[in-house]
Amino acid sequence: MPIFSPFGRLRQRLEAGEKIINGFCSAPSPVLAEFIARQGFDSLTLDLQHGLIDYQTSLTMLQAIAGAGIPTICRVPWNDPIPVMKALDAGFEAIICPMINSREEAEKFGSYARYAPRGVRSFGPTRSLNLFGPTYSEVANDQILTFAMIETETAVNNLEDILTVPEIDGIYIGPADLTLSMGFTPSILVTEPAVIDTIEHIRAATKRKNKFVGIHCSSGAVVAEMLANGFDIATISTDIRIFVAAVQQELKAARTGQKKDPKGDALSY
């Protein structure tokens, strides 16, 4: 008998009220993705927008992640039907689409992720059918998640209209572009009061429409804060940022220790 993976895990957990801690892969490495997937994240996102990952590599990374049994999200490069449909055919369970600024753009994105009559997704779920089983086409429309990224002042001004689009399941806030759009230096570590207030406005408006809301965060501590403050899903930085920060910390410790003990005659393992 064929062995199929469970489908719709992310949606089911969110609908049950669970808080999701999301990992974020930017490096094009199946080995690194496999290691990260086994660290205890609730979901993992592969970044095909600003990450260094192409479609073929993302497919291999999906296969590496599969053994950890966690749902995988794709941040597609842009609001275009081809990357959305190919990501879903490859086996991603959710899509984050950048720079959704209007209801029309949200409607297009939502339609790319759903089969007729709810959308325009073309049928050919090559890996998804093999991964999730023969009922995939019957349940895909209801199990896949679509997150529209709100990351500009224009999008914030059009947020109420965007939230009325039925095929948009949630909002994912991009703090860096939002900060930049509001006239400040771009950063995922938000300190500007005006941006903080805008983020809370987006969160509250999204929850009033009974949709899921997520955000990209600079650290695990910020993730804990955001989840406690009503977000459903929050991302801890990126694999590359975390790796570089850890390397810098260890190198700093090595340099500091070297200065304290120039003779190097005291070793501890």
Image (cartoon, rainbow, N blue to C red):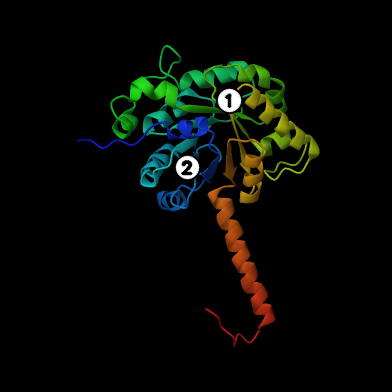
Q: Where is residue 246 drawn, in percent x and y?
A: 58, 60
Residue 194 in view in this figure: yes
Q: Where is residue 28 drawn, in percent x and y?
A: 46, 47
Q: In this view, does 73 lie to the left or right of 172?
A: left
For label 1, the SS is: loop
The N terminus sits in image quarter: top left
Q: In this view, does 205 lie to the left or right of 82?
A: right
Q: In this view, does 176 lie to the left or right of 106?
A: right
Q: Where is residue 264 drawn, in percent x and y?
A: 60, 85
The residue at which mark 1 appears reads as 211
Residue 133 versus residue 221 in the image, above or below: above
Residue 152 in view in this figure: no
Hey, which quadrant is residue 140 in on the image?
top left
Q: Where is residue 238 drawn, in percent x and y?
A: 56, 47
Residue drawn at (63%, 70%) of the image? 253
Residue drawn at (50%, 24%) of the image? 80
Q: Which amino acid does label 1 sit on?
A: Lys
State the separation of the CA atoms marked 1 and 2. Answer: 29 Å
Between label 1 and label 2, give the one nearer the viewer: 1
Q: Nearer the viewer, residue 185 or 72?
A: 72
Q: Nearer the viewer, residue 31 or 195?
A: 195
